[in-house]
Image (cartoon, grey):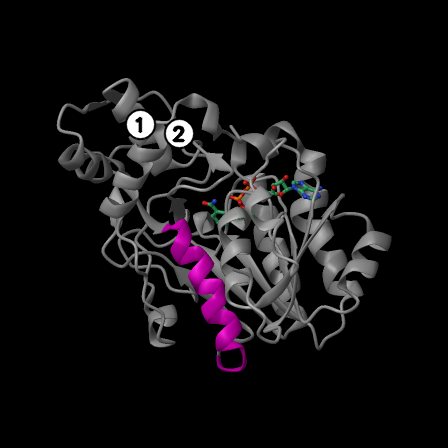
Amino acid sequence: MVKNSPSAGRVFITGGAGYIGSVMVPILLSEGYHVTVLDNFRYGQNSLLGCCHDPRFEVVRGDCRREDLVRELIRDKDVLIPLAAMVGAPICDRNPFDATSINQQAVEMLVRVSSKAQRILIPNTNSGYGIGQKGQPCTEESPLKPISLYGRTKVAAETAVLGRGNAISFRLATVFGVSPRMRRDLLVNDFVYRALTDHAVVLFEGHFKRNYIHIRDVARVFLHGLNRFEEMKDRAYNVGLEDANLSKLELCEAIRRVLPDFVFTEAPIGEDPDKRDYIVSNGRILSTGFRPEYSLEFGIRELIRCYRMGDGVIQTNG
Ligand SMILES: NC(=O)c1ccc[n+]([C@@H]2O[C@H](COP(=O)([O-])OP(=O)(O)OC[C@H]3O[C@@H](n4cnc5c(N)ncnc54)[C@H](O)[C@@H]3O)[C@@H](O)[C@H]2O)c1
């Protein structure tokens, strides 16, 4: 049943048909928001079909770099959420023009054409903490100095948005979990796939630590930011599970607790483009009252149910 209650606000989301957007959009609709998605559907995804029944949902197939289109679509919106991006280091390295123009310049344009009264919430990657303070937990004050083009364009977008003001940036840990636009090229999603199908994985940089967060907690933290915008605005927030600052080996051990026939071994077969090896402190977002609800084990079990449907449901940005 579609709710008849008054609108909670009008939200414009670029890239709303992506991995994160396809989970976030239905949640925003269910909370009473009107949601307009601008997406070029570059992966041929059908991930928002379940939203079409809702009269509060609008969708436009188009490019977030088109200033005329963006100006027109944001005119009556209260909130702007730029998710559209070339996501991940490999796809950015293969498409450097798109990486810069979508991840960075389109956000700079959005900053320029929006009114200051419009609130902006943007996701950033925390991968740039990788090169920095070994051994010490990274806070939002730690230098974010990514090496990869992906990381650099995302940090530039965050800088533009926070520089404008009336905005929040969420520095997301590596996201895991199931979405209607399913991505396998994310560490947890990939390892669970391999554990289930190959029963084995060969790790590089197995002792390097990272932080993780479930995709539904990502959608929840955006909602939290909308609900507490005035007290949270004009800052960046790390968003990860406090109890999941795990090395790749520890992640594999967590998967093996659910899939006991999984074997893993280490070999010097690769290198992380952002040299990610860090522990993240999520103290700032926790101090605003946000609590993640989904554990790593929950996500592993959810991913297993997803992969049992076969490879037809999976996409990759790799
Ligand atoms: N998934 C993660 O682990 C993670 C972590 C940190 C930050 N983020 C950020 O979250 C956002 C969403 O990531 P995701 O995981 O959903 O990735 P995704 O690749 O699934 O989604 C990106 C979406 O943008 C759309 N898009 C691409 N180019 C476009 C263009 N020119 N015009 C309009 N739409 C376009 C794609 O069709 C897709 O729907 C990105 O900004 C990403 O940098 C993701």
Q: Is residue 190 left or right of residue 230?
A: left
- Rendered image quadrant of residue 249: top left
Residue lying furthest top: 198
| Mark number displayed over residue 53 | none
Q: Residue at x 26, y 33 (%)?
A: 206
Q: Is 4 rendered above or below residue 238?
A: below
Q: Could you tell me how many numbered marks the image carries?
A: 2
Helix, strand or loop under label 2: loop
Ligand 1 shows up in the quarter that is top right
Tell me which segment is drawn in magenta: 214-231
| Mark number displayed over residue 271 | 2
Q: Is 177 rendered above or below residue 114?
A: above
Residue lying furthest bottom: 231
| Residue 303 in the image, given as x and y percentages of width and height | 33, 36
Q: Earlier in the sequence, mark 1 or mark 2?
A: 1
Q: Is residue 221 magenta?
A: yes
- Identify the main secondary structure in magenta: helix
* Residue type, mark 1 in image: Phe
| Residue 5 in the image, given as x and y percentages of width and height | 57, 74
* Residue type, mark 2 in image: Glu
Helix, strand or loop under label 1: loop
Q: Is residue 181 left or right of residue 54?
A: left
Pick the front one: 100 or 43: 43
Q: Is residue 30 left or right of residue 81?
A: left
